[in-house]
Amino acid sequence: MAALSGFDIDALRWDQSTFMGRLKHFFNITDCRTVLLSDSKLDEAKALVESCRAGSVPPGTTVEQLHYAKKLYDSAFHPDTGDRMNLIGRMSFQVPGGMALTGFMLQFYRTIPAVVFWQWVNQSFNALVNYTNRNAASPITPKQIVVAYTTATSTALATAVGLNLYTKKAPPLVGRWVPFAAVAAANCVNIPMMRQQEILNGIAVTDENGNKLGHSRKAAVKGITQVVISRIAMSAPGMSKY
């Protein structure tokens, strides 16, 4: 216990001013192995994190155990609310979930029914991810969620079906780009729509010590734009391979 006195469990393990530090941090909290753990295991990790924050660490607890508990906490619990996130919406599920969906969309793109079904599944998945990882300080109403989901799904389906029909007589290589184009178009709609409250009202801006300075719509637009670009870039290598 003495060795852990003054231990700050919320302090980041790696230097976030460097690329490698940020890379290690996000690799750590998006480790897909964490999705295999039970809810009880995750709740135990949360309890340990909260105990450490309160300055009451169970006897015999090691620093490594605290780091691991924080890893599980960050991977499974919402940073704003502290609530456990649904498994499919967690960022740690993105690699296995996204990989499977990408494979299905690349495999089943030749017929309209297949395109419609897999684009609908993919956009449902994306909408759940965007909602799960929303900024809880900017609440979104059920009506706005439905509008965002419907708009993004319609955009993806219209793009995919339209391009599918357009490329019927094109070389097979061109047809392979249909799923990627649909995903890219939908991302440009899904994410901003699901996080529209942040764009309209701004997000909280803090200094390096966490002190709130105010709200900024410009920061929200910049952040959401970067998310859209990164989502499209992440899907590009796999979906434009063939």
Image (cartoon, rainbow, N blue to C red):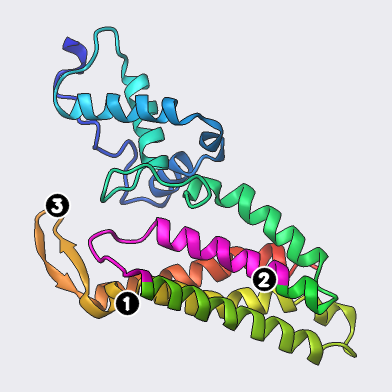
Mark 3 element type = loop
Q: Give the residue pinned by disc 2.
A: 119
- Asked whether residue 199 is in view, the answer is yes
Q: Pointer 3: residues within 10 angstroms few (<14), some, or many (20+)?
A: few
Distance between mark 2 and mark 1 Cα atoms: 26 Å
Residue 189 location (% of width, % of height): 48, 79
Q: Which mark is residue 221?
A: 1
Horizontal side, residue 100 vs residue 17: left or right = right
The residue stretch that appears in magenta: 117-142
Distance between mark 3 and mark 1 Cα atoms: 21 Å
Front position among marks 3 and 2: 2
Mark 1 element type = helix
Residue 48 location (% of width, % of height): 28, 24
Most common SS among magenta residues:
helix
Q: Give the residue pinned by disc 3.
A: 210
Horizontal side, residue 203 vs residue 37: left or right = left
- Tell me the amino acid under the disc marked 2: Gln
Residue displayed at 62% across by 73% down: 183
